[in-house]
Image (cartoon, rainbow, N blue to C red):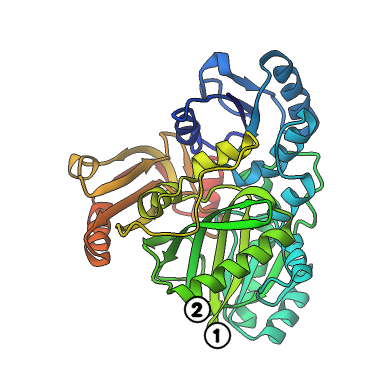
């Protein structure tokens, strides 16, 4: 089978490994990037449109489809979900409809869909000005969450504790979303709904990450992972643990909540990355993305729950039901983390043999390449890569992960001492 993968704007080499993995299932992957580098994929299966405009991307996809007769269109990128839906529709291939894709991309439209469908969510308000944000925060009670409607990767997401802090963070977030499109690279020429800010009530319980599948009337929680981050105010340092500590009753609650939300969002045949957080003993939806989660969650799902989100993406792209089951842990203990560094221009990332060759490591991906720009909150949330370790217990896996992470060295060609200095190199 021939699969067409799309990125409106190439995001470094972040998704290359997933395209390669999709080919291990016996398919051939062709990559169409709106803009990007010439050497990203084998030349005979790679095209650059030279534009992020959705009409240009669709036109080139149609030309290529006439030659190759693709069997499906896929993406692993948050900012490509809407473009892929539009291309699949234009080519007459399986895919979620464009409206569902937009509701999966825009957090404000997503919240409205959840309300209509009766899915449990935090209180929220779309805020155009600081006074609106202050009013919402006063009503909900501090702390609150401030986030972009069209964000991803925790860019410009803040936990805000006071009116004074809201004034500071609101300005940072408002300035940030002005160039967020350049960072996340959605296709141009599509109406993705309001591009602004939300204030949400804070949910004070634990958070869980789910790799799932919606197939017709059923929703499957393929993998459930605990987020164990020592939380700050920027939500940029994800650390995960599996198997989940949730009991059967809470898992049933989560399944009901995610099912309501997925159907409200319009996801009938789709992979899903769902984020759920408890509050007063009940699960609330943070979001459902219509793509596979990042941070190595595909490897975690396979190892700890025998669920393969990459294979599910491929199967659904081809219009067939994936091999999926309701959540059933394998019993393997893992911890995994995003590798975070200081800001700067990367010269080299050095991984010692002790880490690279350890049988305790199940996940090691260095996504940052020489010359890449690393940005830190509030200007951005670029990571170096991912590290995951396994053990006979949570404690063993966690201690090994932290020890190995401390031994990975990042050398900078141009360290940034201030946000303005880093932006000069952008």
Determine whether, in the image, residue 76 is placed left or right of residue 338: right
Number of other residues with Cα within 10 Å of mark 1, as a class: few under 14, some 14 to 19, many 20 or more: few
Q: Tell me residue 401's x, y (percent).
A: 27, 56
Residue at 69% x, 77% y: name it: 123
The numbered mark, 2 or 1, whose residue comes first in the sequence reads 2
Tell me if residue 7 can be seen.
no
Query: Quadrant of the rendered structure where residue 391 is?
Result: bottom left
Q: In what quadrant of the picture does the C terminus appear?
A: top right
* Outermost residue to the left: 354
89 over 257 or under it: above or below: above
Tell me if residue 252 can be seen.
yes
29 over 216 or under it: above or below: above
Q: Tell me residue 176's x, y (percent).
A: 65, 56
Give the secondary structure at mark 2. Answer: loop
Determine whether, in the image, residue 393 is placed left or right of residue 317: left
Report, in whole angstroms, how far the alpha carbon at label 2 lies from the one at label 1: 7 Å
Give the secondary structure at mark 1. Answer: loop
Residue at 23% x, 62% y: name it: 399
Q: Nearer the viewer, residue 277 or 342?
A: 277
| Contact, mark 2 vs mark 1 (Cβ under 8 Å) | yes
Query: Quadrant of the rendered structure where residue 283 is?
Result: bottom right
* Label ID, residue 101: none
Query: Quadrant of the rendered structure where residue 94 is?
Result: top right
* Label ID, residue 280: 1
Q: Which residue is mark 2?
A: 205
Residue at 71% x, 20% y: name it: 65
Q: Tell me residue 230's x, y (percent).
A: 40, 70
Determine whether, in the image, residue 145 is placed left or right of residue 108: left
């Amino acid at each position: 089978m021939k699969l067409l993968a799309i990125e409106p704007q190439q995001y470094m080499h972040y998704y290359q490994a997933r395209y390669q993995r999709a080919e291990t299932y016996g398919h051939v992957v062709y990559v169409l990037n709106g803009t990007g580098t010439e050497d990203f994929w084998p030349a005979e299966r790679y095209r650059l449109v030279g534009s992020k405009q959705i009409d240009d991307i669709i036109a080139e996809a149609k030309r290529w489809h006439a030659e190759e007769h693709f069997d499906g269109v896929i993406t692993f990128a948050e900012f490509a979900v809407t473009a892929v839906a539009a291309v699949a529709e234009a080519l007459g291939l399986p895919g979620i409809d464009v409206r569902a894709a937009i509701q999966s991309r825009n957090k404000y439209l997503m919240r409205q869909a959840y309300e209509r469908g009766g899915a449990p969510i935090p209180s929220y308000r779309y805020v155009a000005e600081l006074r609106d944000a202050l009013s919402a925060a006063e009503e909900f009670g501090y702390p609150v969450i401030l986030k972009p409607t069209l964000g991803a990767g925790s860019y410009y997401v803040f936990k805000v504790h006071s009116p004074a802090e809201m004034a500071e963070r609101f300005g940072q977030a408002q300035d940030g979303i002005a160039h967020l499109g350049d960072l996340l690279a959605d296709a141009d020429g599509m109406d993705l709904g309001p591009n602004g800010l939300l204030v949400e009530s804070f949910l004070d319980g634990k958070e869980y990450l789910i790799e799932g599948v919606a197939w017709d009337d059923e929703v499957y929680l393929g993998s459930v992972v605990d987020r164990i981050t020592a939380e700050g105010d920027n939500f940029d340092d994800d650390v995960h643990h599996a198997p989940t500590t949730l009991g059967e009753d809470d898992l049933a609650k989560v399944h009901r909540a995610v099912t309501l939300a997925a159907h409200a969002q319009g996801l009938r045949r789709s992979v899903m990355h769902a984020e759920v957080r408890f509050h007063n003993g009940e699960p609330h939806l943070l979001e459902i993305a219509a793509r596979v989660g990042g941070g190595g969650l595909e490897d975690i799902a396979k190892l700890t729950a025998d669920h393969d989100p990459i294979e599910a993406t491929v199967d659904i792209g081809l219009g067939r039901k994936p091999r999926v089951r309701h959540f059933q842990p394998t019993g393997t203990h893992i911890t995994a983390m995003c590798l975070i560094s200081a800001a700067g221009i990367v010269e080299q990332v050095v991984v010692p043999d002790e880490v690279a060759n350890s049988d305790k490591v199940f996940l090691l991906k260095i996504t940052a390449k020489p010359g890449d720009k690393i940005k830190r909150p509030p200007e951005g949330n670029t990571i170096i890569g991912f590290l995951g370790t396994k053990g006979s217990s949570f404690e063993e896996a966690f201690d090994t992960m932290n020890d190995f992470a401390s031994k990975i060295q990042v050398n900078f060609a141009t360290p940034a001492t201030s946000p303005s200095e880093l932006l000069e190199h952008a």
